[in-house]
Amino acid sequence: MILNKEKFRSLIFPLLVIAIIAGMIGCKSAETMSNSDAMIAEDSAPMVQEMITAHPVPAAAYGTYEIDQEKGYYVEELSDGLYYVTEGMYHVMFLTTGEGVIVVDAPPTIGDKVLAAIAEVTDEAITHVIYSHSHADHIAAASMYPPDAVYIAHEETAKRLSSQEGGSRVAPFGAFLGGSPVPVPTVTFSDSYTLEVGNQKLELSYRGENHIAGNIYIYAPKQKVLMFIDVIFPGWTPFKYLAITENVPGYIAAHDEVLSFDFEILISGHLTRLGNRADVETQKEYMNDLVGNAAHALQTVDFMAVAGKTGWANPWLLFDTYLNEVADMCTDSTVVKWGDKLGAVDIFTWGHCWKMAEMLRVD
Ligand SMILES: [Zn+2]
């Protein structure tokens, strides 16, 4: 049961096909408008799509599960009634309690397949819903859960979800992800909250801003499973710009917070496998290198030399060139060490370096 590179590609491939076909249709209609007379003769010429490639991803980034293509999800009991569900990109956790199901998060990419996964393993109804944080890509399918369930989150998450459409919003919550506004949590907490239902216990805690204000640690002490989303990316470099974190110092500090829990399995929200303590230690070392390499680049790249090349008439040209050179130098030092150890280091390290340098300059 392996989600190897081929399986992963088989998940992504249908999306690529849609994109390519859409591109072909786009090309064709443009051609139709600009050169309709020549269309008939040229119509039979096949378009050749050049593949975009990158540095090979280490095999250790891939997991040990296989997505059933018919079902579109994978569900597994990790221990004692605690399960996780994935479609290969996002993770959901749920627990059977004997008195109803507790479920954490509702990514629109998995959507009602979460309901199918739960129904596959239990007849219990969903009675409790926890939001890990307020980002729509992790919870904007939550309106599929029973409206009379108990919805629990950090008070900051509830605050951010209190107005999800209308008013000053640019777009309704989740609109760009196939999701929709979600039930606002009615049980909230500031520091910690223990949820006990039937034979299960979850310890929720908040230890300061990291990825986003309100992002909580969800710990199952009996199973030694920790769920903590969008900070640790087992086997991979974090998503772009330190996973779009709102608080870089808090994001870095969260690595030690994670390690302070007595856990064996980490459900971290994304990608091709679950995590463990070694993954957290590895990413902590990568973060330390990013800080060191960004600091060194800030101390080394000569601002006045850059100004000599750009002049002073356009300050944004000067600053952009300078900050790009800082990020370039930090990236070169980081990729040479990490390129073969984590997936996609060549893709996102530049963004991490840029963000780390900004943190060092202004935070
Ligand atoms: Zn997030």
Image (cartoon, rainbow, N blue to C red):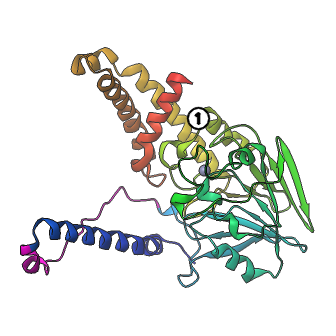
Residue found at x 32% / y 70%: 22
x then y, percent, for residue 335: 41, 43
Q: Is residue 181 above or below residue 252?
A: below
The quadrant of the picture occupied by the N terminus is: bottom right
Residue 322 placement: quadrant = top left
User: Does the magenta run of residues contain 43?
Assistant: yes
In the displayed structure image, the side of residue 339 where residue 187 appears, left or right: right
Residue found at x 68% / y 38%: 209
| Range of residues picked out in magenta | 37-58
x then y, percent, for residue 227: 72, 56
Main secondary structure type of the part rendered in magenta: loop
Residue occupied by mark 1: 248
In the displayed structure image, the side of residue 310 where residue 73 appears, left or right: right
x then y, percent, for residue 64: 58, 71
Q: Is residue 122 above or below residue 52?
A: below
Name the one closer to the observer, 157 or 14.
157
Name the one closer to the observer, 278 or 197.
197
x then y, percent, for residue 69: 53, 82
Label 1: which secondary element? helix
Name the one closer to the observer, 274 or 99.
99
Q: How many marks?
A: 1
Taking the view exactly as shown, the residue that stands out farthest to the bottom is: 70
User: Does the magenta run of residues contain 72?
Assistant: no
Residue found at x 36% / y 55%: 55
